[in-house]
């Protein structure tokens, strides 16, 4: 049996693959994102067991070293992971190492990668309102000469904006670490990736009110086109301060 303290990724995969209780192995994190690994990257591995199965592998539950982190779950628990939750994006872009489920695990990952239509619409409404709120506070603070508050609110608005844009495309938002990776390989429809990332970088760093207004004009058009006008119209005359002057 491998020594838990010095358990290597390849050795554990071989051990798990030989266990009939294991229906799948799923790798997430940097190792599942091509080109994102560094000398510090470990292997984050989900070990998926058949529901109700018994196995000695459970002794590795919670195993965490600089090389290998293990999460051992039943198939039912794996289906629920990140639904909703922070883990959803990690699993949406995870890589299947082993699938003995007849394609069930692959379908579970596909379901995590795409929000249901109703779910996406509701989330987009929520994030649009949050984005508008922070943007409004930022440009108002800029108007009133409160530079620090304006920059902080601008940075908050970008977080909500990214949630919104990915919800409009029915995708979970990537972690900041993978934002450029995601947009380079899977661009958002109708958005120029280079220009969007440039605006996100510039606004987060400076709180530039004019840049925020220009970006809001694009967001407003996209939101209205996709049926979210009620959220925007609820802002009434305050919209004038958010739009290009």
Image: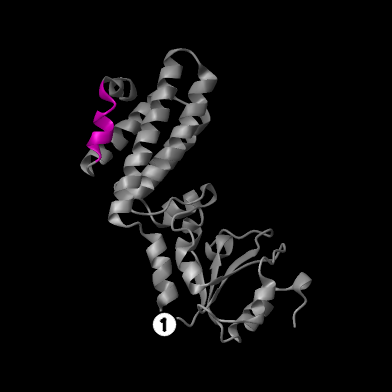
Q: Residue at x 75, y 73 (%)?
A: 4
Measured along the vertical axis of the image, is residue 229 above or below residue 144? Answer: below
Q: Position of residue 34 (x, y in %)?
A: 52, 63
Measured along the vertical axis of the image, is residue 213 above or below residue 89? Answer: above
Q: Position of residue 20 (x, y in %)?
A: 56, 87
Q: Nearer the viewer, residue 27 or 217?
A: 27
Q: Residue at x 27, y 40 (%)?
A: 223
Q: Which residue is mark 1?
A: 102
The C terminus lies in quadrant:
top left
Residue range corresponding to the magenta coloring:
228-236
Whether residue 13 is visible to the viewer of this picture, yes or no, is: yes
Q: Position of residue 44 (x, y in %)?
A: 60, 65
Q: Position of residue 48 (x, y in %)?
A: 54, 74
Residue 235 is one of the magenta-drawn residues: yes
Under circle 1, the secondary element is: loop
Q: Residue at x 39, y 66 (%)?
A: 110
Q: Which picture quadrant has residue 161?
A: top left
Measured along the vertical axis of the image, is residue 116 above or below residue 233? Answer: below
Q: Nearer the viewer, residue 14 or 216?
A: 14
Whether residue 169 is visible to the viewer of this picture, yes or no, is: no
Q: Residue at x 38, y 54 (%)?
A: 171
Measured along the vertical axis of the image, is residue 201 above or below residue 138? Answer: below
Decide whether the magenta segment is chiefly helix, strand or loop.
Answer: helix
How did the renderer colour the structure? one colour
Tally of numbered tags: 1
């Amino acid at each position: 049996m491998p020594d838990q303290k010095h358990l290597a990724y390849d050795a554990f995969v071989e051990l798990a693959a030989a266990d009939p209780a294991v229906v799948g192995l799923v790798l997430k994190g940097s190792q599942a994102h091509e080109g994102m690994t560094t000398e510090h990257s470990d292997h984050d591995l989900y070990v998926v067991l058949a529901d109700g199965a018994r196995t000695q592998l459970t002794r590795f539950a919670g195993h965490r070293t600089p090389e290998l982190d293990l999460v051992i779950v039943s198939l039912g628990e794996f289906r629920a992971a990140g639904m909703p939750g922070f883990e959803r994006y990690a699993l949406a872009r995870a890589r299947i190492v082993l699938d003995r489920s007849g394609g069930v695990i692959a379908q579970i990952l596909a379901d995590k990668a795409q929000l249901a239509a109703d779910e996406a619409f509701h989330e987009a409404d929520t994030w649009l309102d949050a984005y508008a709120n922070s943007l409004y506070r930022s440009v108002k603070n800029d108007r009133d000469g409160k530079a620090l508050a304006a920059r902080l609110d601008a940075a908050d608005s970008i977080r909500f904006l990214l949630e919104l844009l990915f919800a409009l495309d029915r995708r979970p938002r990537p972690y900041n670490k993978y934002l450029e990776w995601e947009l380079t390989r899977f661009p958002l429809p109708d958005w120029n990736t280079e220009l969007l990332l440039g605006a996100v970088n510039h606004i987060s760093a400076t709180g530039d009110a004019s840049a925020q207004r220009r970006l809001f004009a694009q967001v407003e058009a996209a939101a209205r086109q996709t049926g979210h006008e009620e959220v925007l119209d609820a802002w009434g005359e305050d919209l004038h301060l958010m739009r290009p002057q």
